[in-house]
């Protein structure tokens, strides 16, 4: 069945294609198109018809075949999936308490019958990174409480806007779904309705990396070097040249590259080699790896580039990854969950979702020990709060806060000195009477 693109969906894709320079000035732009018979500008947007198809017609990403792209998406997605999320209620003393109701169970344990929370968050995050958008339909019970988060692939959803409010059209569902019944995680983009795939935005970088990988495959398939040339005395016809070349490649190319060649009829083989370093292959792969790491905002070392790695700061690298790579995504997840899974009355009562990043933000043992000691001495953390951060159960009397007696303001020092002087003067006056 041929699936037609809606006018609004076509307009958004056409606008993105124009921003990427894929539609030339004065080029005729078809107002409607289909996945089965895409217009020329849509083919260029999707990478169809080129030597390297970065993005397929349904948002599937052949770029995932590139190890660095795959590693970056897997790294971010798996860490998002591994992070637990909790539902809290703010309490009067400024603290919070854990709330374990059905909504908490839905998000923390199992969003739908098909997958657990880890797989769900990992899948959604990977979809957002690869395609720019990830969608989950919120199914509610008779009391309007969410009871299932049903995952849909990005190509199965498109958006229309009515009076400034978005409605989502899901494949297989005839009625448009209002915005408050859809979890929508989007990548960075300039479109108010949808995110833009980082891969599509940086198509040239990814295509260059894929082409380099394809050259590498051909390079080794042909024995790791350009073999050389055959020198044959006398003049040869074009057909004879082709036949000799084909015969040589068949006998001594690919898996047969290291067989002992036999040259006859006065011929002579003139070998030459071209190392990968001479062809700047290694340098090009280093460049694309660093570029792709920059696209996904991760350190190249985390994608396997260990040449300049400093393993003494690996823990700090993990903290940097949690702070600058994961935190922006975490805020998007928390805001979507808070606004669409909780009612306005629940939010007024202080209910909110929170991902637990403590494990990712931990430094080494000595650093944590010094930090906790400093926070307890200043009365910022109690012993039980430190125990919670380290995964220990609370202990009796551990909720008390400490205050340093040798730390005070200048005003407090002045008042204490005046009080001491007054007491001394009073003692002197009493001793004279």
Image (cartoon, rainbow, N blue to C red):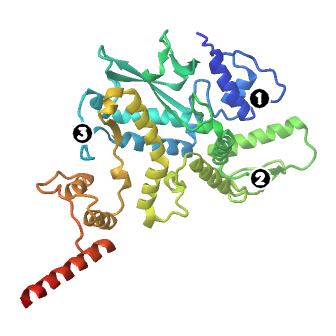
Indicate the quadrant where residue 164 lies: top right
**Residue annotated with mark 2:** 228
Residue in view at x 79 percent, y 42 percent: 245
Q: What is the crowding at mark 3: few (fewer than 14 residues within 10 Å), some, or many (at least 20)?
A: some
Residue 207 x/y as whole percent: 67, 40
Residue 407 appears in the picture as rendered: no
Q: State which quarter of the image contains the N terminus.
A: top right
Q: Is residue 54 above or below residue 281?
A: above
Estimate the spatial distance between the alpha carbons at disc 3 and disc 2, rounded to whole Å. 71 Å
How many numbered callouts? 3
Residue 76 appears in the picture as rendered: yes
Report helix, strand or loop for mark 2. strand
Q: Of the residues under marks 2 and 1, which one precedes in the sequence?
A: 1
Question: Depth check: 276 or 174 in front?
Answer: 174
Q: Is residue 121 above or below residue 167?
A: below
**Residue annotated with mark 3:** 98
Q: What is the crowding at mark 1: few (fewer than 14 residues within 10 Å), some, or many (at least 20)?
A: many
Estimate the spatial distance between the alpha carbons at disc 1 and disc 3, rounded to whole Å. 53 Å
Residue 18 x/y as whole percent: 73, 30
- Tag 2–tag 1 contact (CB < 8 Å): no
Q: Which label sits on residue 23?
A: 1
Indicate the quadrant where residue 319 lies: bottom left
The label nearer to you, 2 versus 1, is 1
Residue 274 x/y as whole percent: 73, 56
Question: Depth check: 349 or 324 in front?
Answer: 349
Q: Of the residues under marks 1 and 3, which one precedes in the sequence?
A: 1
């Amino acid at each position: 069945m041929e699936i037609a693109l809606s006018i609004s969906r076509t307009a958004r894709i056409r606008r993105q294609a124009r921003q990427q320079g894929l539609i030339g000035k004065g080029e005729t732009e078809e107002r409607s198109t289909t996945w089965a018979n895409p217009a020329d500008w849509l083919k260029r947007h999707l990478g169809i018809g080129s030597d390297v198809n970065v993005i397929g017609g349904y948002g599937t990403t052949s770029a995932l075949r590139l190890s660095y792209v795959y590693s970056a998406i897997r790294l971010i997605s798996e860490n998002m999936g591994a992070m637990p999320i909790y539902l809290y209620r703010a309490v009067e003393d400024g603290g919070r308490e854990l709330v374990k109701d059905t909504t908490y169970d839905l998000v923390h344990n199992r969003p739908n019958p098909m997958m657990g929370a880890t797989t769900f968050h990992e899948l959604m995050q990977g979809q957002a990174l690869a395609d720019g958008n990830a969608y989950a339909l919120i199914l509610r019970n008779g009391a309007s409480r969410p009871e299932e988060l049903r995952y849909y692939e990005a190509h199965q959803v498109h958006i229309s806007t009515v009076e400034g409010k978005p409605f989502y059209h899901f494949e297989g569902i005839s009625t448009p779904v209002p915005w408050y019944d859809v979890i929508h995680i989007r990548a960075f983009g300039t479109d108010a309705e949808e995110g833009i795939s980082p891969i599509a935005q940086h198509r040239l970088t990814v295509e260059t990396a894929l082409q380099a990988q394809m050259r590498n495959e051909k390079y080794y398939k042909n024995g790791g070097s350009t073999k050389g040339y055959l020198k044959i005395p006398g003049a040869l016809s074009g057909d004879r040249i082709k036949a000799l070349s084909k015969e040589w490649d068949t006998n001594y190319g690919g898996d047969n590259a290291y067989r002992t060649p036999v040259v006859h009829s006065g011929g002579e083989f003139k070998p030459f080699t071209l190392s990968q370093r001479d062809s700047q292959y290694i340098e090009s792969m280093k460049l694309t790896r660093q570029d792709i790491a920059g696209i996904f905002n991760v350190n190249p070392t985390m994608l396997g580039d260990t040449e300049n790695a400093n393993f003494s700061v690996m823990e700090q690298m993990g903290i940097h990854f949690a702070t600058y790579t994961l935190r922006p995504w975490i805020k998007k997840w928390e805001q979507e969950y808070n606004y669409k899974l909780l009612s306005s009355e629940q939010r007024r009562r202080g209910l909110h979702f929170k991902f637990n990043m403590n494990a990712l933000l931990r430094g080494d043992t000595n650093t944590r020990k010094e930090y906790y000691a400093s926070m307890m001495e200043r009365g910022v953390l109690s012993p039980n709060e430190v125990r919670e951060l380290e995964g220990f159960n609370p202990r009796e009397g551990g909720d008390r806060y400490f205050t340093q007696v040798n730390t005070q303001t200048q005003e407090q020092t002045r008042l204490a000195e005046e009080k001491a002087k007054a007491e001394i003067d009073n003692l002197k006056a009493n001793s004279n009477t």
